[in-house]
Amino acid sequence: MTLAAAILAVLLALIFLALGTAKILALNPMRALAAEAGFSVAAYRRIGLLEVAAVVGLLIGLVQPLIGVLAGAGLLLLLGGAVVVHLRKGDGPRKYAPALVCGLLVATYLVLQLAAR
């Protein structure tokens, strides 16, 4: 693993630990986002659980790269789904930009990990 991949893994872990925990706890802003996206709070909590599971995978990936790659692939699928939900709702770039930027960070992490093999 390169230093850049390790830094990205930790950065992504921090981002998704915060987001996933907020979703699991169903904090008011997350409840509003769930309703706006058409998800139940329970469904949004499950998405948060998947995000936290990806955090664990990214951190394990620091010593076991294949686990990190699998966690990154899972996050990329989640973020792709988020972008699709925003586009289907007709949201503008300000709404889907965070998912897109995080997706690009995850994709960069995956490219770095796979190139290091």
Image: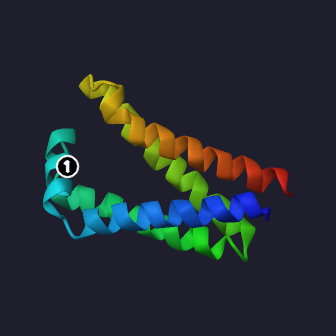
| Up/down of 48 relative to 105, above or below | below
* Left or right relative to 74: residue 92: left
The quadrant of the picture occupied by the C terminus is bottom right
Picture quadrant where residue 86 is located: top left
Q: Residue 74: horizontal and vertical position, in percent?
A: 53, 55
Residue projecting furthest to the right: 117
Number of marks: 1
Mark 1: secondary structure: helix
- What residue is shown with label 1? 34
Q: Residue 44: horizontal and vertical position, in percent?
A: 25, 56
Q: Nearer the viewer, residue 88 or 11?
A: 11
Residue placed at 66% from the left, 46% from the top?
108
Residue placed at 73% from the left, 67% from the top?
65
What amino acid does circle 1 point to?
A: Ala
Residue 49 appears anywhere in the view: no
The quadrant of the picture occupied by the N terminus is bottom right
* Left or right relative to 78: residue 59: right
Residue 37 appears anywhere in the view: yes
Q: Nearer the viewer, residue 100 or 47?
A: 100
Residue placed at 55% from the left, 62% from the top?
11
Q: Residue 58: horizontal and vertical position, in percent?
A: 59, 67
